[in-house]
Image (cartoon, rainbow, N blue to C red):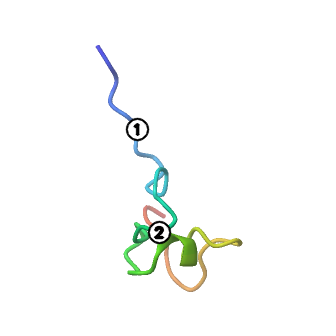
Amino acid sequence: MKAAPVADDPFAGTGRNEKCPCGSGKKYKQCHGAPGGASGHATVGG
């Protein structure tokens, strides 16, 4: 029996050109994927 993947990190597996899972509407690379991380808005699950 296989265990279901654990989704602790909503950003894991997000491509740089996909929409950011935080809901900002920005591309991941311009939001949470940018060097230094997100600034100015809350993160998912925290």
Residue 4: x and y in percent read: 32, 30
Q: Residue at x 59, y 75 (%)?
A: 38
- Foreground mark, 2 or 1? 2
Question: The residue under label 1 is which amino acid type?
Answer: Val
41 displayed left or right of 4: right
**Of label 2 and label 1, which has the lower sequence position?**
1
| Numbered disc 1: secondary structure | loop
Q: Residue at x 44, y 80 (%)?
A: 26
Judge whether 46 appears above or below 42 on screen.
Answer: above
19 displayed left or right of 41: left
| Numbered disc 2: secondary structure | loop
Question: The residue under label 2 is which amino acid type?
Answer: Asn
Residue indicated by mark 2: 17
Q: How far is disc 2 from disc 1 in space, using C-alphas?
A: 23 Å
Judge whether 1 appears above or below 36 on screen.
Answer: above
Closer to us: 17 or 12: 17
Q: Are marks 2 and 1 in contact (CB under 8 Å)?
A: no
Q: Which of the 4 image quadrants contains residue 32?
A: bottom right
- Residue furthest to the top in view is 1
- Residue furthest to the bottom in view is 40
- Residue furthest to the right in view is 36
Judge whether 30 appears above or below 2 on screen.
Answer: below
Residue indicated by mark 1: 6
Closer to us: 29 or 24: 29
Residue 41: x and y in percent read: 51, 82
Residue 14: x and y in percent read: 46, 57
Q: Which of the 4 image quadrants contains residue 1?
A: top left
Closer to us: 39 or 27: 27
20 displayed left or right of 16: left
- Residue furthest to the front in view is 17
Q: Residues within 10 Å of mark 1 (few under 14, many from 20)?
A: few
